[in-house]
Amino acid sequence: MGDPIYIKLATGSTILLLVILQFGWDAYQQFVDGAKQLVLNRRISLQLEMRNNELDELNRQLSVTATHDSLTDLYNRHFIVAQLKQQLDLFRRHGNPCSIVLMDIDRFKQVNDQFGHASGDEVLVVFSKRTESQIRLGDTFGRYGGEEFLLILPMTELPSALSLAERIRGYLASTPLLEHPRPLTITASFGVAQIKANESIDSWLIRSR
Ligand SMILES: Nc1nc2c(ncn2[C@@H]2O[C@H](COP(=O)(O)OP(=O)(O)OP(=O)(O)O)[C@@H](O)[C@H]2O)c(=O)[nH]1
C-alpha cells in the first residue's frame, strides 16, 4: 500500500493525463485555468468576508460613538432627545404615561476647582454608574450635558417617578463618591415631571428643572 498522498497525486496526474488524451491540450488548459479561477474566487470571497466583518465592526463602533457620551459611556444628549420624541409620540397616540427625572450635581464647579478636572471626571463617571445601578432595564439614563443627567421612565406616573428619584438621591448621599484625597459625598438636585397633554419636549424639560 502506498502513502495516501502519493496515491492522491497519482490520481490527480492520471486525471490530467486522461483529460489531455481524451479532449486535447486546449481542453487541459481550460481545465487548469478553471481550477486557478476557482482558487482565486475562493480567495476573493474570503477577503470580502473579512472586509464585511471589519465594516460591521466599524459601523457598530460608529453607532456607539454617535449615541454615547465618551466619558461616562451613558447615552448622549442627541440619543436622549430622540427617546423623548418617541415617548411624546407614544403618549399622543396611545396615552402611554412617561416621566423624566433631571439630575444636576450640586456645586460641581467646586469639585473641579478644589480637586482638579480629573477628579471632576471621576465624580461624573462614578455618579453615572451608581445611578445606573438603581434603574430598571426599560428606563433610559443619559448625560444631558456637563453635570446634568436625564432619566426617562416609560409607562411611569409622577408618584412612582418621585419615589424612584428619592431613592436615588438617598443612595447617592449615603456613601462618599470619591475616597481620595479625602472622602467626598456628592449630592444632586432632582426635578421630576410627567408628560402632559399638548406639551412640547422643551416645556416638559423646563418643568423638570
Ligand atoms: N471635570 C469635568 N467638568 C465638567 C465637564 N463638563 C462640564 N464641567 C464643569 O462643570 C461645571 C458646571 O458648573 P455650574 O454650571 O456652575 O454648576 P455647579 O457648580 O454644579 O453649580 P450648581 O448647579 O448651581 O450647584 C463647570 O465648571 C464645567 O467646567 C466634564 O466633562 N468634566
Image (tube, rainbow, N blue to C red):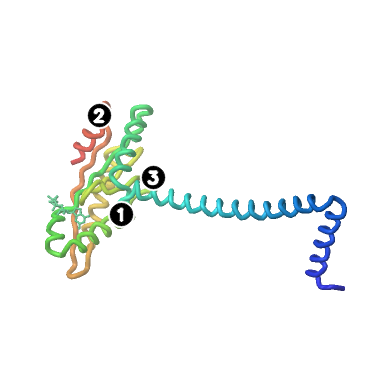
- Looking at the image, is mark 1 or mark 2 earlier in the sequence? 1
Q: Secondary structure at mark 1?
A: loop
Which residue in the rendered view is the most extreme toward the front? 25
- Residue 104, how many percent across, how many down? 19, 49
Which residue is at 71% across, 52% downward? 33
Which residue is at 48% across, 53% downward? 54
Disc 2 residue type (three-letter):
Glu
Mark 1–mark 3 Cα distance, whole angstroms, equals: 22 Å
Front position in the image: 67 or 93: 67
- Give the labeled residue for mark 3: 138
Q: Secondary structure at mark 3?
A: loop
**Left or right side of 64 for 42:** right
Which residue is at 32% across, 51% downward? 74
- Give the labeled residue for mark 2: 199
- Give the labeled residue for mark 1: 70
**Left or right side of 68 for 34:** right
Disc 3 residue type (three-letter):
Gly
Mark 1–mark 2 Cα distance, whole angstroms, equals: 31 Å
**Left or right side of 118 for 113:** left
Screen quadrant of the C terminus: top left
- 10 Å neighbourhood of mark 3: few (<14), some, or many (≥20)? few
Mark 3–mark 2 Cα distance, whole angstroms, equals: 23 Å
- Looking at the image, is mark 1 or mark 3 earlier in the sequence? 1
- Residue 90, how many percent across, how many down? 36, 32
- Looking at the image, is mark 3 or mark 2 earlier in the sequence? 3
Q: Choose mark 1 or mark 3, whichever is in front.
A: 1
